[in-house]
Image (spheres, helix red, strand yellow):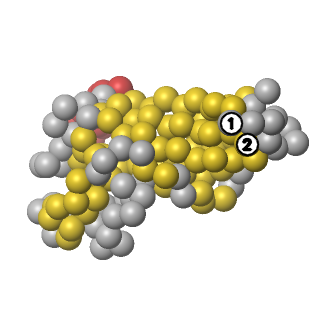
Amino acid sequence: MYILIFLFPYFFTSIDVPEFQKSTPVRWSFEIKKINNTEFEILATATIEKGWILYSQFTDDNGPVPTQFVIDEQVVRFEEKTTSMKEFDPLFEVEVIKFKDKAIFSKIIKKSATGKVNGYVTFMTCDGAKCLPPTDVNFNLDIN
């Protein structure tokens, strides 16, 4: 009986974790475009499921985790190409900047000696009732 009581919570926890990992409401894609022989543009596109939002890089420090890009272990600000919304968020009780449906981010970089760009984006998403924990998505791009 004691073993059953001990294993009961573990059984349900182990079922929920894989399901949680499968259901991410934000999908990322990354591409690189050549501007000239030395400059390239990284485009990061977040496709956001209906009912969910993605937070800007520039949201209030007392609010949700902002979207953040890291390239070669350095935090890098991307230009936010998509029009954002600024409004009061009742979950965090602060004004936040956020995106619905799709968010496109852009960064102009110089060609590196390796011809590669390695990094990741950290983001947080919410649906008005709950938020998912911050998540990292890696990207590896070839400049050649």
Residue found at the very far front of the displayed protein: 36
Disc number for residue 79: none
The amino acid pointed to by label 2 is: Glu
Q: Nearer the viewer, residue 86 or 62?
A: 86
Does the image show residue 20?
A: no
Residue 132 at x, y percent in the picture: 29, 46
How would you rate the neighbour count of disc 1 (Cα within 10 Å): few for under 14, some for 14-19, many for 20 or more? few
Residue 135 at x, y percent in the picture: 43, 45
Disc number for residue 35: 1
Residue 28 at x, y percent in the picture: 45, 32
> Is 28 left, or right, of 108 in this rendering?
left
Q: Which residue is mark 2?
A: 39
Q: Nearer the viewer, residue 45 or 36?
A: 36
Q: Secondary structure at mark 2?
A: strand
Is the Cβ of the residue at disc 2 closer than 8 Å to that at disc 1? Answer: yes
> Is 128 left, or right, of 65 in this rendering?
left
Q: Secondary structure at mark 1?
A: loop
Residue at the (80%, 41%) spot, across then down: 38
Residue at the (19%, 32%) spot, across then down: 50
Residue at the (66%, 59%) spot, across then down: 74
Residue 11 at x, y percent in the picture: 28, 31
Is residue 21 shown above or below 92? above
Q: Quadrant of the N terminus?
A: top left
Is residue 54 shown above or below 66? above
Does the image show residue 46?
A: yes
C-alpha distance separating marks 2 and 1: 5 Å
Residue found at the very far bottom of the displayed protein: 62
Badge count? 2
How would you rate the neighbour count of disc 2 (Cα within 10 Å): few for under 14, some for 14-19, many for 20 or more? some
The amino acid pointed to by label 1 is: Ile
Residue at the (73%, 29%) spot, across then down: 142
